[in-house]
Amino acid sequence: MAKSIIIIGGGIAGLAAGCYAQMNGYRSHIFELHDIPGGLCTAWERKEYIIDGCIHYLFGSGTGQPFNQVWQELGAVQNRPMIDHDRFMTIIDENGRSFIVYADPDQLEAHMKSLSPADARLSGAFANGIRQFMQFDMALLQKKPRRLMNPADWLEFGRKIVPYGLPMARWGLISARDFADKFQDPLLRRAFPLMFGWQDIPVMVGMSVLAYMATGNAGFPTGGSLAFVQAIEKRYLDLGGEIHYKAQVEKILVENDRAVGVRLYNDEIHRADIIISAADGRGTLLDMLGEEFLKTRTRKLYDGHLPVHSQLLVSFGVNRDMSAEPHWTTYLLEQPLLIAGEERTAVGVKHYCFDPTLAPAGKSVIEIMMESTQGYWQRIYGRRLYDTEQSQVAGILLDFLETRYPGIRADVEVKDVATPLSYERYTGNWLGSTCGWLLTDKTMLMMVKGMKKTLPGLDNFYMAGQWVEPGGSVPIVAMSGRNVLQLICHRDGKAFVTSVP
Ligand SMILES: Cc1cc2nc3c(=O)[nH]c(=O)nc-3n(C[C@H](O)[C@H](O)[C@H](O)COP(=O)(O)OP(=O)(O)OC[C@H]3O[C@@H](n4cnc5c(N)ncnc54)[C@H](O)[C@@H]3O)c2cc1C
């Protein structure tokens, strides 16, 4: 009889693990605490508007390009037009000077040089970096778990990675913040740390985003993040998998140093031959397993010294067509705004008019994202202050929008505020982290070296997802679920097989 697998968590990693389990002849069940799939890869409806809470760019959106195969196998990209942007972002300073971050490196280089001839050498180096990463297969490290790579695999890996050794060393260990300091032009100096989500992001990551945009491999899936995930859920169900929603796992059951099942919060017990946790790492190790199998090195990961990224997402549904505006504009401010306890010197405004499925014709969804710590919101949670602070934040940002898009206040039909506590509540992620461990110049090596997906001393147990793949991201966690099934098949002496629907 086929072996059974329980998967904790129906985010991208859990769904991917489930699909590959079914493809390889296992009987799998996913237990998900929420009532919909996707975890962080999600969207929510507010009146007629769909607020997309995740994908800005999907690596693997281009047919035949790196990561596309995994999306084909998961049934996520078939019949799903991808929207490719020719510019990543526009950054405007208080004097109206704009820096347009073009996806095309030639156009970007020319634009940067015209903005600041004094920085021509640096701009050229940045554009060259993007060109170098255009052919780089970032899925290389994820094709097989490192433990299963044989000498021939390592040889092939080495052959493919060697040409990128120097660019990786040069751009992987410098943060956007440090790189920005090298520019003379004040707009470029201020723009670079804001471009790619967080200031300490390695420049290589930002370059890779632009490189994949340039090759048509970092598009936005029409329908948005939830529709994308629902296609994977369908694939899983079509393969015969079973999902249990509103089913939060409280404990992983262990007998004789083997994981044997799970107990839900409603006290139901489910047993299986293999348990995979694709849920929050800290919750898995400290709560569900109860620290017993936590070695000092793993415990240290969760002592707070490593960076995580949590955020505030403020969205508006507006009765106004924003499609003539650039889809993502970051405004640099003369006077900082105090928002959620921190002074903000820039506000990024994104609209989703490029995907007509997300708002009715002539209307738009506007989103503003900013870093915010879970601790700030936790301190005021439970008092009336939490709700007051949420509406105050929305009010400040609406005042700001009014200065850039006059009259917009009257067009607002929907306001929505998601804090790090919302992320924590809906997905269980520690500190409301949006990507597990934040990828910085400090954690880059951790990502390259890879993290273990098993625990010493505990048999039949595996972990997948963003807490064992520093930096997270949807393609990497999908590969993580795939990798775990490769490990399980190897252990069971079976060839790992895949199929494409
Ligand atoms: C705003 C935002 C923008 C992003 N933009 C991008 C982007 O443009 N491109 C990109 O590639 N990535 C992006 N990411 C990152 C990406 O979404 C995540 O790294 C990825 O989705 C994580 O998937 P996961 O399956 O590992 O974890 P999760 O999505 O956290 O899934 C874990 C699942 O486990 C469930 N769970 C937790 N505890 C339990 C329990 N005890 N019992 C049962 N179920 C449980 C949760 O409900 C959840 O569904 C973004 C993330 C955010 C938040």
Image (cartoon, rainbow, N blue to C red):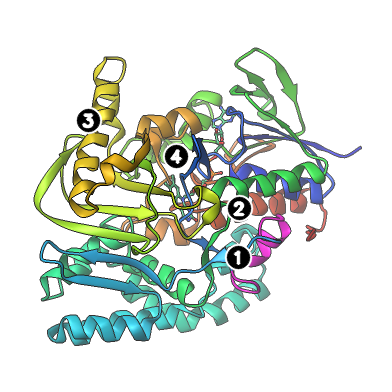
* Closer to the eye: label 3 or 1: 3
Residue 97: percent from the left, percent from the top? 16, 70
- Give x and y (percent) for residue 127: 33, 82
Q: Is residue 100 above or below residue 53?
A: below
Task: Determine which of the numbered discs, if any, sits on residue 392 in the image.
Answer: 3
Q: Nearer the viewer, mark 3 or mark 4?
A: 3
Mark 2 lies on residue: 478
Relative to the observer, which residue lies in front, 323 or 382? 323
Labels 3 and 4: the sequence-earlier one: 4
Secondary structure, mark 2, is helix
Q: Which mark is residue 67?
A: 1
The three-letter code of the residue at mark 1 reads Phe
Crowd band around label 3 with a 10 angstrom C-alpha radius: few (<14), some (14–19), many (20+)? some
**Segment colored magenta:** 62-78
Callout 2 amino acid: Ala
Q: Give, as a three-letter code, the residue at label 4.
A: Thr
Q: Quadrant of residue 241?
A: top right
Residue located at (30% from left, 79% from top): 126
Residue 42 seen anywhere in this rendered image of the structure: yes
Q: Which numbered dot is residue 298?
A: 4
Distance (Cα) linking label 3 and label 4 = 39 Å
Counting residues from the start of the chain, the first of labels 4 and 1 encountered is 1
Q: CA distance from mark 3 to mark 2?
A: 37 Å
- Distance from label 3 to label 1 (Cα)? 41 Å
Looking at the image, which residue sits at the far right?
1
Label 1 vs 2, first from the N-terminus? 1
Question: How would you rate the neighbour count of disc 4 (Cα within 10 Å): few for under 14, some for 14-19, many for 20 or more?
Answer: some
